[in-house]
Amino acid sequence: MRGDILTMDRAGDGNLRADLGYSFCGVINAKTTSYTVKQNEAGKVFSNLGAGAAIVFTLPVPKIGMTFRFMRLTVAYKVTITPPTGIKIQNQTAAQSIMTATANTTDVGIVTVVGISATEYMVMSESGPWTLNDGSTVI
């Protein structure tokens, strides 16, 4: 997905929606402070649009097929995605956070994570500077 163009529009219902030209992202749930995502919010898109500082999204315990998409739209601030204690992301040996590059980058970041078991998330797609805590790239 690197190099894709993200289009943002207000829909007729007033909600902000994102379109990658080939894959509709859906309604964007903008959060300006750190937020704990709930299992019943699977399938939703979250962003830091309007945030005035770095924020953390904490994932819920995964279920197989449970999907979340995160977007860093306010590029001046880092977005971190953290699993709950004991949950892994991307086959790490210990629980790891996914984060965007530091605040000095101008790249919009988009990442989709999906639950593949009761103890692990995998990254299905990403665009932008997402890395794991160990410094490795996501995909």
Image: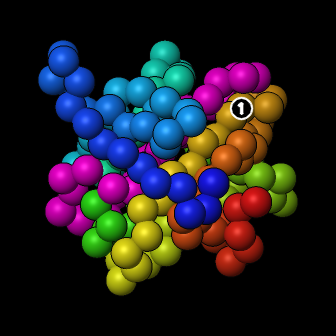
Q: Quadrant of the C terminus?
A: bottom right
Q: Residue at x 31, y 51 (%)?
A: 48
Q: Residues within 10 Å of mark 1 (few under 14, many from 20)?
A: many
Q: At 55% across and 69% down in the image, what residue appears?
A: 129
Residue named by callout 1: 115
Please, is residue 90 above or below residue 60 in the view? below
Q: Is residue 26 something one can see in this rendering?
A: yes
Q: Quadrant of residue 102?
A: bottom left
Judge left or right: residue 75 versus residue 115: left
Relative image position of residue 11 (x, y in whole percent): 23, 24
Left-right relation of 121 to 112: right
Is 95 a magenta residue? no
The answer to whether residue 87 is above or below residue 60 is: below
Q: Which residues are magenta?
A: 49-73
Secondary structure that dominates the magenta span:
loop
Residue located at (43% from left, 70% from top): 107
Q: Does 63 lie within the magenta span?
A: yes
Of the residues shown, which amino acid type is indicated by label 1? Gly
Residue lying farthest bottom? 104
Decide which of 60, 18 is in the foreground and name it. Answer: 18
Q: Secondary structure at mark 1?
A: strand
